[in-house]
């Protein structure tokens, strides 16, 4: 039995007219067969070569318990799938269904995964076994799901002309930590289904298993991709279980004809469809309900009649033809086939330009591959390698000097990203300097700009580092015993404490700076590669050579950073090994100023001054005003002895020696002396360390990239050319891979050319002979 869309009015049944009808039907069937064959081949081409076009298809989306796979089987008219509770479908299953009136039993072909142009005929049992095996295999793998489609071509006299894609069922996991595994699966499935729904050519068949349309379980996911539901058909499944739930006719009326505001969009078909699929499997076993697929189809028809009768009984009225056209699997099947057929015919004129564009693109690729094959000889490969060397160095120099060619959103790093990927500057307390206080912290930088920001942060952090706290125990332990007397030498004590504190404080910063700058330099490599690719200067297909260049660059950066760090460590070691009180005044001025500030008064505020002492001359030689009776201790040191103060001076000197040299009990004045000296020494080391480290990293890490790297890379390149050119460029594998690429592109070109001719003929037939409404539709 066959139906036609928009069938013409009946005419007199003469033998001539009957023969003419048979002839027209034959032409129509042939045109229809060619149309679906062309679109099936187009879908396979898109899957195999990832071409930018998709044949119209119906994408079935629903949750695990919505009866998704069972509905797909009912639409096809036979059972084949892996159905049941829980997650069964773990890979999308694409079903290219073709109506063939001469095919009494389903003829199935499983498309090869390695070569989509090849397919193998399988029985329904073999198809079902293959799907079950794939589901079990994926269930044992960590990912548990795969986006790669299982493609099956089916011809059957009861099969609609449809391309259906059955997707894994969406999962609604319960919250809580114990359900984390299921939550992870739910995210994976939703991501897979969302990716499939992105294809604009797909009609989305959205399955809902609910009796209240305000509960948008599957629609919530679908509307994220199709917010207006303009390419979505909504289906309420398991109608036979919902009808008994309604107690009033008004509830049934709202369910069958929900308000437009409830569905939040303009769905295809204007209103939902309602289906029921009888339970039970086809087979010969004791647990099988149906002995054949014909019994299964008959049960579906009976189920539709029973649903209509049950609804009319609930409503106490007969259903209108419009209402009946939305109830049952056969009605949904007819609607989808008509809709998809119209999409097919509307898309034919649009497919031809896309095929032309893809043909030109493939032709261009073939030309490039042929050119690469012609350059696979030693002399030309050496020339290409040297040219790449020069271009690579040019891009490196450009990145250091500054450029905006590379997109910051792809290659730039904010300061926070840089700290995560390259390490942060942290002191002994483990705290980081607030990144918002660093200039350009929120900007995504790379190259020279990023290097400068890292140096600026280093200056901020180290420049603001204070001397760690000093304890009384540290002071007493640092005093020790001299080799010629047992007195205390607080200047030596201060030096011992200061250099130990400075070494422990500043050494980690050196390692952190080296790691950070090395990270920034290594990032130049992928950005340079991007710039070369953008300018068409990249050596594609020469992975071994490019890997050697990348390895040489990374090794150079690491060895240079290590050498620079060793120089900085030597400098820090010398700075923290010997303290020079004053390089310009030979210690005299610094000592005089300190003694004057200590000896002027007994008041704590005047006991010691905390002027910071540097490695240069002191900033001021002025003395604080003292009382007239005070005698400066520096006068004694310089030999000046005022006659009226000798006794007072001697007394004060004795007190000073008693509290500093002869007394081991740490007095407050002694503690203040040591503290002041340590602060002065630490500050001087810090200033010298900061300037020295920045200068050395600029001279011995940054500058070698400019003046030493080119010669090193060229030397490594020429050495490789002389030793083993074949391994550098992997000439044998290169020829093989290029040859394989050429063969693949040639196959693609032939398939595109064949499809172009098919679609052109179909387009000519559709334009001249066959009206869209006259193509026959399959029926049970």
Image (cartoon, helix red, strand yellow):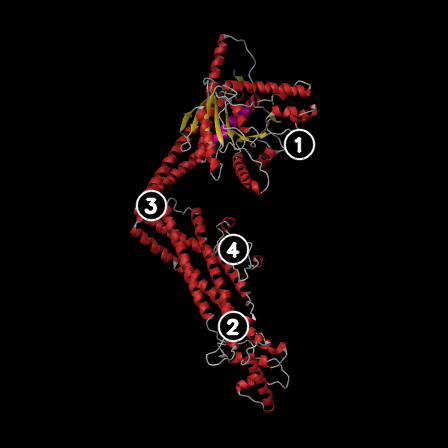
Q: Residues within 10 Å of mark 2 (few under 14, many from 20)?
A: few
Q: Which mark is residue 261?
A: 1
Rate crowding at label 4 as few (under 14), some (14 to 19) or many (20 or more) other CA atoms within 10 Å: some
Label 3, on which residue? 730
First in sequence: mark 3 vs mark 2: 2
Q: How far, Cα to Cα, is label 3 from label 2? A: 66 Å
Residue beneath disc 4: 419
Q: Earlier in the sequence, mark 2 or mark 1?
A: 1
Q: The residue tagged with tag 1: helix, strand or loop?
A: helix
Depth check, front residue: 487 or 156? 487
- Which residue reaches farthest top? 14
Q: Tell me if residue 730 comes above or below residue 515 in the rendering.
A: above
Q: Does residue 540 appear in the picture of this structure?
A: yes
Is most of the magenta stretch helix, strand or loop?
helix
Looking at marks 4 and 2 on the same chain, the residue that comes earlier in the sequence is marked by 4
Segment colored magenta: 334-353
Mark 3 or 2: in front is 2
Determine whether label 3 and label 2 are within 8 Å by CB.
no
Q: Earlier in the sequence, mark 4 or mark 1?
A: 1
Q: Nearer the viewer, mark 4 or mark 1?
A: 4
Q: 132 left or right of 718?
A: right
Q: Is residue 347 located in the magenta-colored stretch of the structure?
A: yes
The residue that disc 2 covers is 477
- Mark 4 falls on what kind of element? helix
């Amino acid at each position: 039995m066959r139906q036609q869309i928009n069938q013409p009015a009946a005419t007199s049944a003469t033998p001539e007219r009957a023969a003419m009808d048979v002839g027209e039907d034959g032409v129509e069937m042939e045109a229809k067969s060619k149309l679906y064959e062309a679109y099936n081949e187009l879908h396979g081409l898109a899957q195999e070569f990832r071409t930018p076009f998709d044949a119209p298809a119906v994408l079935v989306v629903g949750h695990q318990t919505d009866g998704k796979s069972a509905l797909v089987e009912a639409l096809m008219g036979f059972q084949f799938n892996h159905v049941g509770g829980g997650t069964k479908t773990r890979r999308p299953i694409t079903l290219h269904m073709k109506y063939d009136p001469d095919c009494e039993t389903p003829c199935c072909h499983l498309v090869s995964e390695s070569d989509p142009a090849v397919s193998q005929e399988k029985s329904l049992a073999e198809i079902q076994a293959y799907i079950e095996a794939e589901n079990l295999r994926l269930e044992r793998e960590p990912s548990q799901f795969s986006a790669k489609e299982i493609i099956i071509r089916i011809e059957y006299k009861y099969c609609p002309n449809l391309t259906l894609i059955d997707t894994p069922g969406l999962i609604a996991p319960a919250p809580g930590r114990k359900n984390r595994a299921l939550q992870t699966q739910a995210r994976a499935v939703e991501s897979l289904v969302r990716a499939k729904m992105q294809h604009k050519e797909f009609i989305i068949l959205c399955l809902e298993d609910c009796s209240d349309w305000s509960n948008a379980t599957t629609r919530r996911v679908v509307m994220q991709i199709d917010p207006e539901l303009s390419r979505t058909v909504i289906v309420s499944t398991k109608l036979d279980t919902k009808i008994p739930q309604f107690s009033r006719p008004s509830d049934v009326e709202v369910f069958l004809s929900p308000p437009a505001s409830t569905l939040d969009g303009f769905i295809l078909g204007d209103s939902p469809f309602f289906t029921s699929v009888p339970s039970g499997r086809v087979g010969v076993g004791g647990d099988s309900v149906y002995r054949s697929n014909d019994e299964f189809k008959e049960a579906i028809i009976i189920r539709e009649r029973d649903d209509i009768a049950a609804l009319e009984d609930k409503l106490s009225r007969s259903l209108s033809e419009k209402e009946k056209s939305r109830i049952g699997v056969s009605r949904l099947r007819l609607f989808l086939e008509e809709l998809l057929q119209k999409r097919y015919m509307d898309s034919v004129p649009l497919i031809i330009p896309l095929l032309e564009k893809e043909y030109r693109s493939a032709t261009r690729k073939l030309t490039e591959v042929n050119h690469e094959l012609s350059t696979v000889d030693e002399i030309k490969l050496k020339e290409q390698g040297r040219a790449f060397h020069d271009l690579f160095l040019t891009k490196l120099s450009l990145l250091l000097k500054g450029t905006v060619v590379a997109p910051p959103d792809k290659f730039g790093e904010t300061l926070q990203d840089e700290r995560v990927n390259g390490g942060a500057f942290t002191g002994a307390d483990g705290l980081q300097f607030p990144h918002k206080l660093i200039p350009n912290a929120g900007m995504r930088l790379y190259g020279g700009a990023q290097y400068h920001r890292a140096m600026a942060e280093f200056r901020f952090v180290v420049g603001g580092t204070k001397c760690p706290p000093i304890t009384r125990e540290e002071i007493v332990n640092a005093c020790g015993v001299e080799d010629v007397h047992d007195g205390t030498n607080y200047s030596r004590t201060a030096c011992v404490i200061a250099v130990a504190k400075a070494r422990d404080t500043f050494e980690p910063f050196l390692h952190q700076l080296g790691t950070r700058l090395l990270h920034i330099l290594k990032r130049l490599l992928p950005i340079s590669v991007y710039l070369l690719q953008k300018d068409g200067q990249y050596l594609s297909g020469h992975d071994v050579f490019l890997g050697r260049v990348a390895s040489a660059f990374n090794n150079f950066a690491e060895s240079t950073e290590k050498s620079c760090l060793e120089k900085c460590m030597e400098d820090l070691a010398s700075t923290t090994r010997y303290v020079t009180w004053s390089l310009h005044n030979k210690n005299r001025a610094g000592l005089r100023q300190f003694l004057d500030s200590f000896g002027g008064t007994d008041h704590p505020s005047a006991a010691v001054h905390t002027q910071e002492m540097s490695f240069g001359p002191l900033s001021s030689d002025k003395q604080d005003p003292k009382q007239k009776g005070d005698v400066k201790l520096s006068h004694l040191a310089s030999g000046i002895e005022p006659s009226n103060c000798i006794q007072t001076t001697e007394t004060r000197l004795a007190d000073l020696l008693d509290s500093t040299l002869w007394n081991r009990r740490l007095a407050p004045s002694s503690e203040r002396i040591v503290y002041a000296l340590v602060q002065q020494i630490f500050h001087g080391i810090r200033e010298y360390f900061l300037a020295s480290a920045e200068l050395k990293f600029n001279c011995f890490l940054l500058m070698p990239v400019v003046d030493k790297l080119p010669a090193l890379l060229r030397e490594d390149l020429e050495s490789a050319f002389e030793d083993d050119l074949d391994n550098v460029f992997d000439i044998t594998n290169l020829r093989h891979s290029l040859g394989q690429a050429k063969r693949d592109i040639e196959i693609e070109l032939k398939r595109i050319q064949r499809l172009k001719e098919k679609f052109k003929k179909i387009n000519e037939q559709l334009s001249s002979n066959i009206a869209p409404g006259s193509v026959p539709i399959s029926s049970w």
